[in-house]
Image: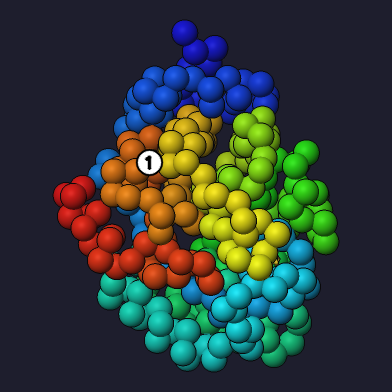
Amino acid sequence: MPATEDGELRHDWTVEEILDLHETPILELVGRANATHRRFRPQGVIHKSALISVKTGGCSEDCAYCPQSARHHAIDLTPTRLMNPAAVVETAKAALAAGADRFCMGAAWRRPPKGAEFDAVLEMVRGVSALGLETCVTLGELDAGQATRLAEAGLTAYNHNLDTGPDYYERIVTTHSHADRLRTLGVARAAGLQLCCGGIIGMGETKRDRAALLRELTALDPHPEGVPINALTPIPGTPLGDRPPPDPLDMARMIATTRLVLPTSFVRLSAGRATMGREAHILCFLAGADAVFLGDTLLTAPNASADHDAALFAALA
Ligand code: SF4
């Protein structure tokens, strides 16, 4: 019998408890996660986001998975300046027409610069929000004033991932700390923004590190409204470029565990979809995922194609 009733909203999970859940036999784990999903989440609804890079590459940080770091030498990545807000809004219109519920904009910065570039980001948020789309940005570290201005511009959610458990974090990122990330999440929450915050599996972390990541997320009060679960997309030229992509069953296990400990959040099946087949997607939806990103690329990484997703959603209908 489970030690706690499935679906209980808790902020005091221990790593051991979450690890125990994670190691439950897969059929029981997915079954329990599915029952929790059916109890707490709208049925048959997959939330769809489009994600574009509005400023690519040249980033000062050293995140080991990321081709946008200026410290790595990713093949096929051309740094770009910040996009024109009008061009971003045109892209958002196309995403809306393609069925997106949310439009997410990412910029490769440690923190957003002040002045004209931040004003341009605010203009993007206002323009996208005026289309009736939910808006999300991921810009790195924020200060309180920037978070407030984003909220006033109509931003729905701020994305800032914890990436992995705190003990493994320094193997992945050394230029900014886990505590820095938690600070930005607090600043965004204090400004009234929803949080989109999750992590990545397949970077060499242990199962305990995965459980520790989820423990950090459950400790946030309230829980993040959205939790992206990413499978590493190994990009040549990055320090993790030679790693194999994680087994889709590991994704399903991570998603099911996430659903059980974060029962009311969107669980967003994120990077890694490009190498997952239709059946693996459906297993992840059964395990509690209820959100995806649309579009051929996720910032700079490959994503499932429009044709793939059309076939997937047709199979779900
Ligand atoms: S993940 Fe973000 S902060 Fe880290 S290197 Fe990439 S763009 Fe920079």
Give amino acid for label 1.
Cys
Looking at the picture, tell me which residue is in the foreground, 158 or 91. 91
Residue in the image at 74% along x and 87% along y: 115
Residue in the image at 35% along x and 74% along y: 95
Image coloring type: rainbow
Looking at the picture, tell me which residue is in the foreground, 203 or 268. 203
Q: Quadrant of residue 292?
A: bottom left
Q: Position of residue 97 (x, y in %)?
A: 28, 75
Residue 167 visible in the snapshot:
yes
Residue marked by disc 1: 284
Residue in the image at 53% along x and 26% along y: 22
> Is 263 on the left-hand or right-hand side of 208?
left
138 relative to 272, above or below:
below
> Is 128 on the left-hand or right-hand side of 242?
left
Q: Position of residue 181 (x, y in %)?
A: 74, 54
272 relative to 6, above or below:
below
Q: Quadrant of residue 223?
A: top right
Looking at the picture, tell me which residue is in the foreground, 71 or 21. 71
Q: Position of residue 230 (x, y in %)?
A: 52, 51
Residue in the image at 62% along x and 32% along y: 207
| Element type at mark 1 | helix
248 relative to 63, above or below:
above
Q: Position of residue 247 (x, y in %)?
A: 47, 41
Quarter of the image where ligand 1 sits: bottom right
> Is 304 on the left-hand or right-hand side of 190?
left
Q: Quadrant of residue 189?
A: bottom right
Q: Residues within 10 Å of mark 1 (few under 14, many from 20)?
A: many
